[in-house]
Image (cartoon, rainbow, N blue to C red):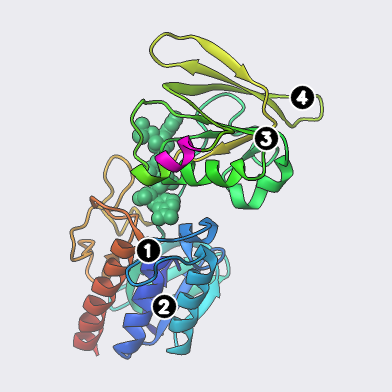
């Protein structure tokens, strides 16, 4: 039996693993794919204290190595649920069950699907959520990026270096992206801002791939068709807490209701990172959650033993 199982190996989970090991807990991290969370696809992370600039994958890999070197164990497995037993938690996965005295849920958030006809149908066939993975497929062609957050602006600038033209399609005139990203994108000759527009339909060709994107102006209803073989969906994330509805209290958006102490309300269960109700979802706040949750879990386990 482990002292602590951490579900999700993003910045919150990896920080929790570092703190848990330093507190002497036998710790297992269960991650469905690759550790690192959202930063895996970030070209450059430039807002983590004391690191002016680092590629996302490198930061993730250093972070995991730090936890592993301290003795945390890692398994790749999809967690399907957690069962509360009298003195322990049974974590069910597609690869079998694991037991622990305490659990931290740090599963973060997943990509929101594109909310228009064709948005899901053409996923992987021209609709993408990863500019750095798929941008090269559209070399010297035109693409659209949907969204007005940091991801949308970063993706657009990355794609502008590869593609002929990049349309940023955003539903409001105001952007939630940081000012310097907006200014930088506006200075690129082949980036065009289309606001306030929403995607109306992704249109396909005979081979079943994206041919164009129809967009609709929110205020006037005017429609335009962009002849683009690539549509990059940067409309943000939704929390991945559904399998834990029995141990977390979820709000109407699916975020786990918890304060800065990361207490879930279920003894021996904490929730850390972007899946928690909070004002600011950033690497640094996810990392802070991981530290808080693991330190509380260490106290809890010590009292149990
Ligand atoms: P985000 O900030 O939530 O932005 C999502 C964007 O998509 C918003 O502009 C939103 O519009 C739009 N949107 C949402 N639902 C939509 C729909 N159904 N139809 C059309 N548009 C829709 O997501 P994000 O850009 O992925 O960023 C997530 C977090 O990661 C943020 O905290 C961000 O700062 C951070 N991040 C950091 C870096 C970095 O530091 N290098 C890079 C990327 C992301 P509204 O604005 O109208 O709601």
Per the model, the C-alpha gap separating discs 1 and 3 is 39 Å
* Nearer to us: label 3 or label 4: 3
The answer to whether 121 is drawn above or below residue 245 in the figure is above
Per the model, the C-alpha gap separating discs 1 and 2 is 17 Å
Residue beneath the point at 32% across and 68% down:
49
Q: Tell me the quarter of the picture where residue 229 sits.
A: top right
> Picture coordinates of residue 302 (x, y %)?
22, 88
Which residue occupies the foreground of this view, 260 or 264? 260
* Nearer to us: label 1 or label 2: 1
Determine contact: label 2, label 4, CB under 8 Å: no
Describe residue 233's horizontal placement relative to residue 244 as left or right.
Answer: right
How crowded pointer 2 is (Cα within 10 Å; few <14, some 14-19, many 20+) is rated as: many
Whether residue 102 appears in magenta in the rendering, the answer is no
Whether the residue carrying mark 3 lies under 8 Å from ligand 1 is answered with: no
The answer to whether 124 is drawn above or below residue 24 in the figure is above
Q: Along the polypeptide, which appears first: circle 1 or circle 3? A: 1
Per the model, the C-alpha gap separating discs 2 and 4 is 50 Å
- Mark 1 = which residue? 106
- Mark 2 = which residue? 99
Q: Tell me the quarter of the picture where residue 297 sits.
A: bottom left
How crowded pointer 3 is (Cα within 10 Å; few <14, some 14-19, many 20+) is rated as: some
The range drawn in magenta is 183-187
- Mark 4 = which residue? 205
């Amino acid at each position: 039996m482990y002292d602590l199982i951490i579900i999700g190996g993003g910045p919150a989970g990896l920080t929790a693993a570092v703190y848990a090991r330093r507190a002497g807990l036998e710790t297992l991290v269960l991650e469905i794919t690759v550790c690192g969370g959202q930063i895996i696809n970030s070209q450059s992370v430039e807002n983590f204290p004391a690191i002016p600039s680092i590629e996302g994958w490198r930061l993730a890999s250093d972070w995991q190595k730090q936890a592993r070197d301290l003795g945390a164990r890692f398994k790749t497995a999809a967690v399907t649920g957690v069962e509360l037993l009298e003195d322990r938690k049974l974590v069910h996965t597609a690869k079998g069950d694991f037991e622990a005295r305490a659990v931290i849920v740090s599963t973060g958030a997943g990509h929101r699907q594109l909310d228009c006809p064709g948005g899901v149908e053409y996923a992987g066939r021209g609709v993408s959520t990863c500019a750095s993975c798929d941008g090269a497929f559209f070399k010297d062609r035109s693409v659209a990026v949907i969204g007005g957050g940091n991801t949308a602006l970063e993706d657009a600038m990355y794609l502008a270096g590869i593609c002929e033209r990049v349309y940023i399609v955003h539903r409001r005139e105001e952007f939630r992206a940081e000012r310097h990203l907006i200014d930088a994108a506006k200075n690129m000759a082949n980036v065009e801002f289309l606001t306030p527009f929403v995607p109306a339909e992704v249109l396909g060709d005979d081979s079943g791939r994206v041919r164009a994107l129809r967009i609709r102006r929110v205020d006037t209803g005017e429609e335009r068709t962009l002849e683009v073989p690539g549509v990059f969906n940067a409309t943000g994330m939704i929390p991945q807490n559904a399998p834990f509805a029995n141990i977390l209290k979820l709000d109407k958006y699916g975020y786990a209701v918890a304060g800065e102490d990361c207490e879930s309300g279920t003894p021996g269960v904490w929730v850390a990172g972007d899946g928690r109700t909070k004002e600011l979802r950033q690497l640094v706040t996810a990392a802070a959650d991981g530290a808080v949750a693991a330190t509380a879990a260490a106290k809890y386990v010590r009292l149990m033993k």
